[in-house]
Structure formats: structure tokens, C-alpha cells
Amino acid sequence: MRVAARGPLHRARHAGRSCGAPTGHGWCAECEETVDDLLLESFARLRSALDGATPETRSGQPVREMVLVCEHLASADARNEDAATWAVKLRRTAGGDEPWLRAARAQLVHYPLLHLEERTRRADAVRRGASARPDRDLRQAAWAAPLRNDPAGLEMLILLVFRMRRRVPDPFQVPDDLRDRHGLTRTEASRRMGTALASLRAANPGFFAANIGEPVTGHGVEAPVDPQESITKDADRDQARAILARLLTARAGEPMACAARRRSYRAVIAAVCALGAGRRADPIAVAVRELGLIPEHAARRVRRLAFLVAAAGVEWADQMAEVTPAGVGA
């Protein structure tokens, strides 16, 4: 069970990176808890079947695979078998295994882990206050009615929410097929994405904060004279702030390596902000030291961060870089 669950859990919670406990060789607390629950559920299911409560199909017939498992475990041969040896064989997926072993693998490992990655993402999202079905909310909720006036923007928002859950490296990049479907250029698509984000934040700040990842500050923005300029500037600012907040805000229980990486980015962004505020700083040197990049790559990374800081606001970004993210010890 642990071997089979490792991949889906790591993809769901750690973007495919390794998952480790602060000490020892175990997994993070959340993944350990999930796999323990899965093991207990499978054990309880097997125990119930051995006690006579065999699970049934929709037609009311006993599940044939579980019957095979129970018949073998109740046989005289099973009494003298080494459980550890069978456990090793259970982890393999090669052919040639005995029918009861294939049945055990299907009933006690394969089926309980179906859609584990998506189920984990959804459960984690709900636990942190996000929507269980954000696509349904955006398409049907009354508060989202203004967002549905722009089909392209709505589709971008739905895609963005699920990309954020999957921790896609560049979730705000509009895919080519979506642009082609709505006849948008890259520039137009980026603008529509920003406008949709600004509209979502205005329509439901709580949904925006929980599903996109930006903290809700509760402070309004004074509108410029030109309404179109207001939409554009607010969209660019909101998008930049969402990216920076996602980069700098730690998740509870994340690996120490991820927390250290965020601290490195906070140092680089703080240097960018210092330079933007007129103070002496060398962000490229900080990026070389903190991120382990060669100067050429560090310069490109700093340039991208500088664009985000400029769009988000130097003062706002400076405050974000100074605040210790949640879940990170002092």
C-alpha cells in the first residue's frame, strides 16, 4: 500500500518532489496519516469479509476477488505461510502470481487507491478552506454570475484553480488550445486572464484567497480616472501579488527543503525591493548565494522577480518578504 500510494501522494502534495519527515526516513505527517488511514480501511474491509460480511456487487453478488482472498486465508495452507514473503510479492505487479494474490492486490491496494491523487488534492483544498468543486461554483453560483459574462475568462479561471492545486510551475500561462478556441493572441489572453482575476477577487475575495492563494487584505484600491486603466492595472497587480504570495507563503507540513527555498526567495525579493526603494542592494549576488545559480541565470531570475515586484508594488512585496510564512519556525 505504501509503495503504491507514494507516487499519487507526492504528486498531490509535493509536486512530484520527495516527501520526508523532519527526522528519520518517514514521510511528512500528512502523507503518513493518509496512508495509515488507507491501510486501516483495507484491513477493516478484509477483517469484515473474513467475518462473513463479504462486499457485494451492484447486482447483490459477492465480490469474486474478495471471496478468493477469504477462501485462501481460511485454508489450511495459509496457516503455515510466511506473511512477510507474501507482502513482498504483493508489491510486485508482474504476471504469474496466484489468483488469490492478484485478487488481494486488486481489492486491498488497487481499488482503494483509485483517484487517490485527485481525492487528496480535493481534501487538502477543502481543509484549507477552498472549494471542493470550484468549477461548479464558478459555473453555477449566484455570486459568480458576472464572471460568466466572459466565457474565455471563466474558462481561464477554472483552469487556473486546478493548476494551482496541481502546483503547476507557471499556472497563469494561458495554454495555446484555449487561446485558439477563443481566438485570442497571447497578449489578449494575458490581459483577459488578469481581468478575470480582478473580477473574481472583487466578486468573492474569500474564494479568491482560498483557491488562488493570495491573502485577503481587506483594503480597497482607489480607482484611477480611466476605468479601463483601472481594470488593467488592478489585473496586473492582482496577478503579480498572487504569484508572489504563492512563492513566499509556506504550506503547513511542507518539507524543510521547500521552506528553505522559500526563505532564499524572500532574501532575493527583499534585495529587489531594497533596490527599488533606493537602498543599496545587489539582488543578483543574493540570488547567486541563496539560490545556487550562476550569475547569468541569477540575472534572468532577478529580472523576472523584478517585473513581479514592480507590478505588485514594492512596498507590498517588501512586506511579504519580511513576514515569516505560516508553518515556518522562527
Image: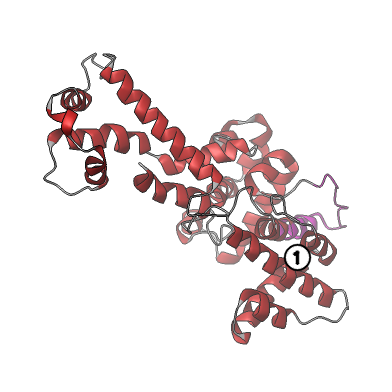
Residue 12 coordinates in the image, percent (x, y): 48, 48
Residue 259 coordinates in the image, percent (x, y): 64, 59
Q: Would you say 325 lies left or right of 185 here?
A: right
Residue 77, picture quadrant: top left
Q: Is residue 204 visible?
A: no
Q: Residue at x 63, y 55 (%)?
A: 192
| Residue 235 falls inside the magenta stretch | yes
| Residue 251 falls inside the magenta stretch | no
Residue 171 coordinates in the image, percent (x, y): 56, 57
Relative to 25, does residue 154 appear above or below in the rendering? above
- Report the colour scheme: secondary structure
Relative to 173, does residue 33 appear above or below in the rendering? above
Relative to 263, does residue 65 appear above or below in the rendering? above
Quadrant holding the C terminus: bottom right
Q: Secondary structure at mark 1?
A: helix
Task: Depth check: give the residue in front, 81 or 97.
Answer: 81
Q: Would you say 178 lies left or right of 95 here?
A: right
Give the labeled residue for mark 1. 311
Q: Amino acid at mark 1?
A: Ala
Residue 61, picture quadrant: top left
| Residues shaded magenta | 217-237
Q: Would you say 239 lies left or right of 157 here?
A: right
Q: Residue at x 59, y 52 (%)?
A: 254
How busy is the neighbourhood of tag 1: few (under 14 within 10 Å), some, or many (20 plus)? some
* Extreme residue toward the bottom, this view: 295
Q: Would you say 114 lies left or right of 67 here?
A: right
Task: Depth check: give the residue in front, 224 or 68.
Answer: 68
The count of marks equals 1
Q: Is residue 325 visible?
A: yes
Residue 202 coordinates in the image, percent (x, y): 75, 43
